[in-house]
Image (cartoon, rainbow, N blue to C red):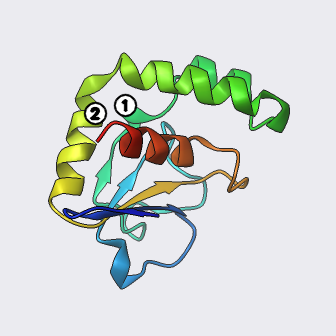
Amino acid sequence: MWHDGSGMVRVRRIYAAREAEDGFRVLVDRLWPRGVSKANAGVDLWLKEIAPSTKLRTWFAHDPSKWAEFQLLYREELERNPEPVAQLRERVRQGAVTLLYSARDVEHNHAPVLLDFLVARR
């Protein structure tokens, strides 16, 4: 979780129950999560353009041995993709934001990398 004067950003699995502190909920996965209906997901924005490319996601396959390289490659993709990053930053300036992801591995997925990228570039 990260907080500055304008808003709080946190990362959560989409399968967790919605909480009042979530604020604006942004799904940051390229694919819609299995077993989650769009009607009940509580997603305010599906920003799939900010997710890792299909090529990078497929290569990584949540393999912890590739974690360090994945982080570098995903950050490079984010640098080359300023529009969705700017859209997300604007949303954070408006208040609390929760980045939602579906991966089982809570440590080795792109959402914490995205959060770190947003914090480092403020």
- Closer to the chain start, of discs 1 and 2, is 1
Mark in front: 1 vs 2:
2
The numbered disc on residue 84 is: 2
- Residue at 21 percent across and 40 percent down: it is 87
Query: Residue 67: image x %, image y %?
Result: 73, 33
Proximity of marks 1 and 2: CB atoms separated by less than 8 Å: yes
Q: Is residue 94 left or right of residue 40?
A: left
Placement of the C terminus among the 4 image quadrants: top left
Residue density around tag 2, few if under 14, some if 14–19, many if 20 or more, within 10 Å: some
Task: List the single residue furthest toward the right.
Answer: 65
Residue type indicated by callout 2 = Pro
The residue wearing badge 1 is 49
- Determine which quarter of the picture holds residue 19: bottom left
Residue nearer the viewer, 112 or 101: 112
Number of on-image labels: 2
Residue nearer the viewer, 84 or 76: 76
Question: Regarding mark 2 in the picture, which secondary structure is present there?
Answer: helix
- Determine which quarter of the picture holds residue 118: top left
Q: Is residue 113 left or right of residue 84?
A: right
How far is disc 1 from disc 2 in space, using C-alphas? 6 Å
Query: Residue 107: image x %, image y %?
Result: 69, 52
